[in-house]
Amino acid sequence: MTKHNHCPICGQPAKADHAPFCSRGCKDRDLLNWLSDGYRLPGASIDPDDAEAAQSGLDTGQTRD
Ligand SMILES: [Zn+2]
């Protein structure tokens, strides 16, 4: 087990209470970074053209029936 973990946010020695971070502040900041990345990725991968194609595909299928 490694006891010399360092906070990935600020580089200070991590505290067991907030591992792998040094404080709750850095833990929250990492969470925010993670969330903002998570929100950004799906938004960028959703292409308006794909949504339109899916809708028109459904419409075409229903019209043919
Ligand atoms: Zn820190």
Image (tube, rainbow, N blue to C red):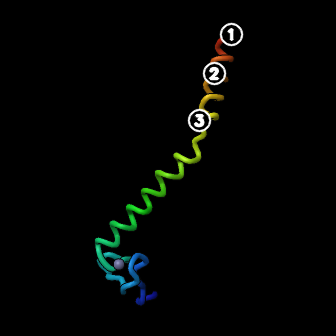
Element type where label 2 sits in the image:
helix
Q: What element carries label 1?
A: loop
Question: Residue at horizontal 36%, vertical 86%?
Answer: 13
Q: Position of residue 38 (x, y in %)?
A: 48, 54
Q: Is residue 7 left or right of residue 24?
A: right
Task: Identify the residue shown where x is 66% and y is 29%.
Answer: 53
Q: Splitting the image into 4 quarters, where does residue 9 fall?
A: bottom left
Q: Which residue is drawn at 36% across and 85% down?
A: 12
Distance from the alpha carbon under mark 2 to that under mark 3? 16 Å
Q: Position of residue 56 (x, y in %)?
A: 64, 22
Question: Which of pointers 1 and 3 indicates the residue nearer the eye?
Answer: 3
Residue 29 coordinates in the image, percent (x, y): 36, 67
Q: In which quarter of the image is ligand 1?
A: bottom left
Callout 1 amino acid? Asp
Q: Which of marks 2 and 3 is nearer the N terminus?
A: 3
Whole-number angstrom distance, CA of label 1 to CA of label 2: 11 Å
Which mark identifies residue 65?
1
Image position of 54 with respect to 47: above or below: above
Residue under pointer 3: 48
- Establish if 63 lies above or below 53: above
Kindly identify the residue that appears in the image at 46 percent across and 51 percent down.
39
- Residue 31 quadrant: bottom left
Residue corresponding to mark 2: 58
